[in-house]
DNA sequence: ACCTGAACACCGTTCAAGT
DNA sequence: ACCTGAACACCGTTCAAGT
């Protein structure tokens, strides 16, 4: 009890100063390990060995923190691929951006909820610009640029988010193969009158791969774009 | 203080009995008027003149309640259009289902967050079956049925959810025209090197209509499907 | 079987006080 | 300028007790 070396009576200051960056970094780690429900100011202060007031000095509120964490992940995904190989077509580059985002959302599933909440602002323009440049490289007539670029961004984010939602259902403890088997069996036992189509594709569903399906879907969208808005040169 | 008529000392029982249906109905109303953050058990008990224990008798927890509310809205949107006009093509029917969902999510923006969370389960098969039947009517080869139907469902839900997220940003008090004007101006002032594409389409963005754009995007996807998987008859 | 309402644990946020 | 930590209001959930 006695004998403490007088100074630093309690809670000595941290070695590294707190910063918005360090807080966002810690938030991403907590979100990755404990999920969206696990991100509390308690968990954050514990990890950063500080008090809630210190965090509020750098960040306005929890919503802003979630937005910043989302921006960090998405920005990282966009920065991953520099310019692509020399012979890459515009389609290749769209695919690269899309799969980068898909993988990022797959690795950080909590990002999906944020991307559907609208509280991220900062990264939208970056994605839009990155995709849009390929739209113009595709030869799409200029008056359709906004529509086509919006469609692509909407489709890519939407499909990736939907996929994350499906993956979220099974949770960390469940085996994917077993889950698909069980779901496929459940589909086969649906009412034949009300669910004739779903019953028919139950087996295809069991065998599908999420990432491949995402990629094929994107190819279909790209094919639709070139079919409806052919390059005019 | 004195003179209360002895019986019904306090909190008389409600006229109509509580039920899961009535609770879900009230939840939808609260969500529509107060938003996702406004749905609390306090608000719910007040509206239903009851205590939290009564709600927990009919509903397991808040998550289940949100899922049930989402199911109710989506089921209503799917039930709205019976079979379509006699001369309707499969494309027409896909469009009808898609726009029904778009409008439902637009009218109940909180649904978007739920649809990206994966906690709804019950309605997914219904949407999938409804779209899937049109995929087979489209003449898509059977071995591609699952992939194509998944793409369509994913695209429709994803695009509608993304749209709701964008609409959510401006909130109830902001005028849409003014918002688009301000955003368009902001786009035009972006850095010309980093945002050349976004700057170019700033004016198109200002003029766009969300619902029309959703519809055009869907048409592009449908065009891609028939281009890549032509009907074989 | 169905409902009441007090109680509990937890969470986001604030703020006077320190350095 | 930056941080501490107690305090506040609020929320989801539980449960003994009633009818």
Image: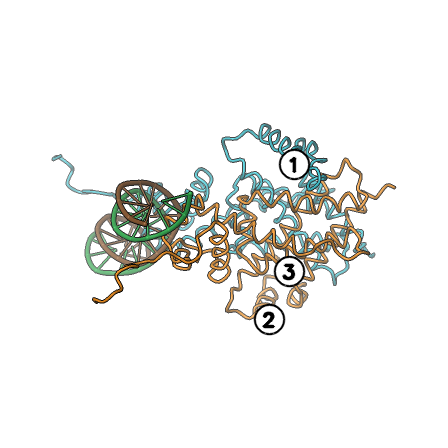
Chain colours: A cyan, B orange, C green, D brown
Q: Residue at x 60, y 30 (%)?
A: A182
Q: Which residue is mark 3?
A: B198
How many C-alpha atoms fall within 10 Å of the one at disc 1: few (<14), some, or many (≥20)? Answer: some
- In this rendering, do the residues under marks 3 and 1 share a single chain? no
How many C-alpha atoms fall within 10 Å of the one at disc 3: few (<14), some, or many (≥20)? Answer: many
Asked if the residue under mark 1 is in contact with the one under mark 3, i.e. CB atoms within 8 Å, the reply is no
- Residue lying at the far left in this picture: please name it: A2
Left or right of residue A44: residue B108: right
| Earlier-in-chain disc, 2 versus 3 | 2
Q: Which one is closest to the eye, mark 2 or mark 3?
A: 2
Percent coordinates x, y for residue B41 in the rendering: 40, 53
Q: Residue at x 60, y 28 (%)?
A: A177
Percent coordinates x, y for residue B112 in the rendering: 56, 53
Q: Which of the image's four quarters has the C terminus of chain B?
A: top right
- For label 3, the SS is helix
Which chain is disc 2 placed on? B
Q: Which of the image's four quarters has the N terminus of chain B?
A: bottom left
Q: Which residue is mark 1?
A: A190
- For label 2, the SS is helix
Which chain is disc 1 placed on? A
Q: Which residue is mark 2?
A: B177
Q: CA distance from mark 3 to mark 1?
A: 48 Å
Left or right of residue A97: residue B88: right
Task: Answer with the quarter of the image where residue B12 lies.
Answer: bottom left
Percent coordinates x, y for residue A136 in the rendering: 73, 55
- For label 1, the SS is loop
Task: Answer with the quarter of the image where residue B207 lies.
Answer: bottom right
Q: CA distance from mark 2 to mark 3?
A: 19 Å
Asked if the residue under mark 1 is in contact with the one under mark 2, i.e. CB atoms within 8 Å, the reply is no
Q: CA distance from mark 2 to mark 1?
A: 47 Å
């Amino acid at each position: 009890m006695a004998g403490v070396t007088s100074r630093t009576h309690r809670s000595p200051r941290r070695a590294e100063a707190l910063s918005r960056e360090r807080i966002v970094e810690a938030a991403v780690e907590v979100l990755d390990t404990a999920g969206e429900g696990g991100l509390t100011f308690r968990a954050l202060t514990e990890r950063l060995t500080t008090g809630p007031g210190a965090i509020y000095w750098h960040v306005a509120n929890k919503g802003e923190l979630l937005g910043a964490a989302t921006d960090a992940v998405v920005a990282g995904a966009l920065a991953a691929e520099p310019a692509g190989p020399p012979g890459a077509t515009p389609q290749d580059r769209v695919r690269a951006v899309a799969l980068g985002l898909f993988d990022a959302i797959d690795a950080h599933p909590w990002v999906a909820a944020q991307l559907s909440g609208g509280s991220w602002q900062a990264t939208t323009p970056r994605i839009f610009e990155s995709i849009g440049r390929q739209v113009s490289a595709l030869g799409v007539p200029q008056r359709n640029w906004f529509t086509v670029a919006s469609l692509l961004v909407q489709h890519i984010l939407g499909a990736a988010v939907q996929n994350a939602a499906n993956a979220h259902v099974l949770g960390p403890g469940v085996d994917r193969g077993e889950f698909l088997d069980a779901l496929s069996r459940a589909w086969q036992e649906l009412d034949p009158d009300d669910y004739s189509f779903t019953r028919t594709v139950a087996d295809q569903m069991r065998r599908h791969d999420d990432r491949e399906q995402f990629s094929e879907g994107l190819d279909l969208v790209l094919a639709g774009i070139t079919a409806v808005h052919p390059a005019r040169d």
